[in-house]
C-alpha cells in the first residue's frame, strides 16, 4: 500500500522548516529553506513544493498544513506579518494548492502547535485545553470540544496580547502592557534589568534563568514577577473556556521551577474557586525541534482516524 503523508511547513522570519509526517506523527523527511532569500512569496512556494516532492519518494501527499505568523485559517492568507518580507495579504495556501495540487490549510503557528499537542503530544484524548508558546513572542491556541477556536475572523486565541499591566510596557501591537511584553524572552530580560538597574551589560533570558537557579536575588525576583503576571493571565483565561489543562511550550518555560513555582502559586491565587484543583498546568509533550512541523501537519491529519 502506498504510504500516505502530510506535509507540515513552519514559516518563520528567518528560517522555514518543513517535513513529511505520517498519521502516527512520525516525521519521515525534513528540510528547510532560508525564508529571507525569497523576495516573492510565489518563488518561496515553488522552492518548498519542490523540496516536498523530493522527499515523497513514491509516497502519496494527502495535504499540506502551514503554520505562519499572522496566518488566517479562513482565508488561507498571511496577513500583515511584521517579521516577513512579504507585505500586505499573501494568499499562501492558494500558492501551495496551485503548485502541489493538494488541499492546503494554514493557520498561525501557535494554533498549529496546539493541534500538534492534541494529536501527537501530551493533550492526546483531551477535548478542552489551552496551549501557550513562549519565545520572542507569546502565542496561544485554544481548543474547545476538540476543535481549535478560530473566532469569527480567524484570529482567536491571542492570549499574548491580553493586557496584564494597564499603561505598562509598549507592545508591538500598538498598545501597552500586553502579557507578551513580560513573559517573552525580551520581557524577562527587561524585568531583570529593572531589578538590577543595569541596562547596558548584555544578558540573555537563558542567562537570567541560570542566575535564578543559582539563587541570584534579582534573577529570582524577575522570574517571580513574570510568574505572577503569567499566572494572572492564565487564571483569567480559564474563565472563558474551562480547560482541563494549560500546556506551556518553549522559551521561558525551559527555566523550570524558578518560573513554574511562582506561576502555579499566582495561578491558584487568581483562579475562580469553582475551577480550583481542576486545571493542570503542564509542560508540552512535544519536542522543541519537531513541534512546529508536527503542528502544521496536524492541520491535515485532524479529523482523520488514526
Ligand atoms: Zn500587544
Image (cartoon, rainbow, N blue to C red):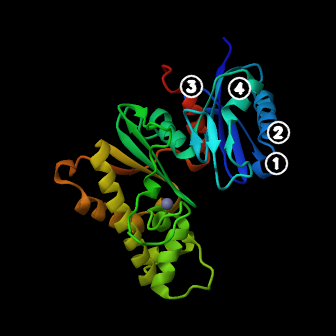
Q: Secondary structure at mark 2?
A: helix
Residue 241 locus on image (x, y percent): 31, 42
The mark found on residue 97 in the picture is 4
Is 74 left, or right, of 18 in this rendering? left
Q: Where is mark 1, residue-wise?
A: 39
Q: Quadrant of residue 21?
A: top right
User: Which residue shows up at 72% across the image and 30% down it?
Assistant: 96
* Quadrant in which the N terminus is drawn: top right
The residue nearer to you, when weighing 158 against 116, is 158
Q: CA distance from mark 2 to mark 3?
A: 29 Å
Q: Is residue 239 visible?
A: yes
Number of disc labels:
4
The residue nearer to you, when weighing 252 against 176, is 176
Q: Where is mark 2, residue-wise?
A: 43
Q: CA distance from mark 2 to mark 1?
A: 8 Å
Would the CB of label 2 be found within 8 Å of ligand 1?
no
Amino acid at each position: 500500500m502506498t504510504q500516505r503523508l502530510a506535509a507540515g511547513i513552519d514559516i518563520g522570519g528567518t528560517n522555514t522548516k518543513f517535513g513529511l509526517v505520517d498519521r502516527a506523527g512520525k516525521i519521515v523527511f525534513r528540510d528547510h529553506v532560508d525564508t529571507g532569500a525569497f523576495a516573492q512569496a510565489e518563488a518561496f512556494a515553488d522552492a518548498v513544493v519542490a523540496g516536498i516532492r523530493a522527499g515523497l519518494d513514491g509516497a502519496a501527499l494527502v495535504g499540506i498544513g502551514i503554520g505562519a505568523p499572522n496566518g488566517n485559517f479562513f482565508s488561507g492568507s498571511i496577513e500583515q506579518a511584521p517579521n516577513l518580507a512579504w507585505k500586505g495579504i499573501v494568499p499562501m495556501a492558494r500558492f501551495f494548492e496551485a503548485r502541489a495540487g493538494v488541499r492546503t490549510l494554514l493557520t498561525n503557528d501557535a494554533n498549529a502547535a496546539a493541534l500538534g499537542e492534541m494529536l501527537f503530544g501530551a493533550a492526546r484524548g483531551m477535548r478542552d485545553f489551552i496551549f501557550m508558546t513562549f519565545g520572542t513572542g507569546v502565542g496561544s491556541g485554544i481548543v474547545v470540544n476538540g476543535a481549535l477556536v478560530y473566532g469569527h475572523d480567524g484570529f482567536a486565541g491571542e492570549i499574548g496580547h491580553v493586557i496584564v499591566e494597564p499603561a505598562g510596557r509598549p507592545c508591538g501591537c500598538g498598545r501597552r502592557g500586553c502579557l507578551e511584553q513580560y513573559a517573552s524572552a525580551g520581557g524577562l530580560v527587561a524585568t531583570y534589568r529593572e531589578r538590577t538597574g543595569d541596562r547596558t551589560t548584555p544578558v540573555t533570558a537563558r542567562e537570567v534563568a541560570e542566575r535564578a537557579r543559582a539563587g541570584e536575588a534579582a534573577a529570582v525576583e524577575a522570574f517571580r514577577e513574570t510568574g505572577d503576571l503569567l499566572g494572572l493571565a492564565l487564571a483569567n483565561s480559564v474563565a472563558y473556556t474551562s480547560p482541563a489543562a494549560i500546556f506551556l511550550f518553549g522559551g521561558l518555560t525551559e527555566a523550570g521551577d524558578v518560573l513554574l513555582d511562582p506561576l502555579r502559586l499566582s495561578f491558584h491565587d487568581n483562579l475562580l474557586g469553582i475551577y480550583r484543583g481542576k486545571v493542570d498546568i503542564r509542560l508540552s509533550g512535544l519536542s522543541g525541534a519537531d513541534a512546529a512541523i508536527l503542528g502544521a501537519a496536524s492541520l491535515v491529519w485532524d479529523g482523520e482516524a488514526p
